[in-house]
Image (tube, rainbow, N blue to C red):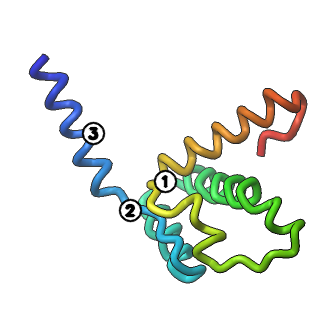
Amino acid sequence: MHRLLILLLLVVLVGCGAPRFDGSSQKAAEASIEAMSAGMSEEESQQLAASVVTILFTENLARAFSGQKPTDAEIYASLDGLTAAEIIAKAEQIRAHANQHHPGAATE
């Protein structure tokens, strides 16, 4: 039990220190992605970038077709405050949902 508590504490501490996405503006969003990508392999960095695109496309598709002109904060709201791991996990959920409802659809 003691080891489990230590492990949970480490996970929380590591998660708290991870860079988080700042969706307040396009410049802040770009800086966030750069900070999150620092220290990642090229493959991990590409996975993060693809995940950001997946989420932004999915979350803003209806807005694009309605002719609305959202602010940067509105565009990036679905990513704001998330870590790289959370962004990748969210994109994987979106892809899994899409594949479940549209078998054979592209995964990336």
Q: Hey, which quadrant is residue 30 in on the image?
A: bottom right
Name which residue type carries label 1: Ala
Q: What residue is at 47 percent from the left and 70 percent from the top?
A: 22
> Which numbered dot is residue 11?
3
Q: What residue is at 52 percent from the left and 67 percent from the top?
A: 33
Percent position of residue 89, x then y: 55, 41
Percent position of residue 6, x then y: 14, 31
**Looking at the image, is 70 positioned above or below residue 98?**
below
| Dot placed on the residue nearer the N-terminal end, 2 or 1 | 2
**Looking at the image, is 83 positioned above or below residue 96?**
below
**How far is mark 2 from mark 1, CA to CA?**
8 Å
| Dot placed on the residue nearer the N-terminal end, 1 or 3 | 3
Name which residue type carries label 2: Pro
Q: What residue is at 26 percent from the left and 43 percent from the top?
A: 12
> Which numbered dot is residue 19?
2
Q: Are marks 2 and 1 in contact (CB under 8 Å)?
A: yes
| Dot placed on the residue nearer the N-terminal end, 3 or 2 | 3
> Which numbered dot is residue 84?
1
Q: Is residue 105 left or right of residue 54?
A: right
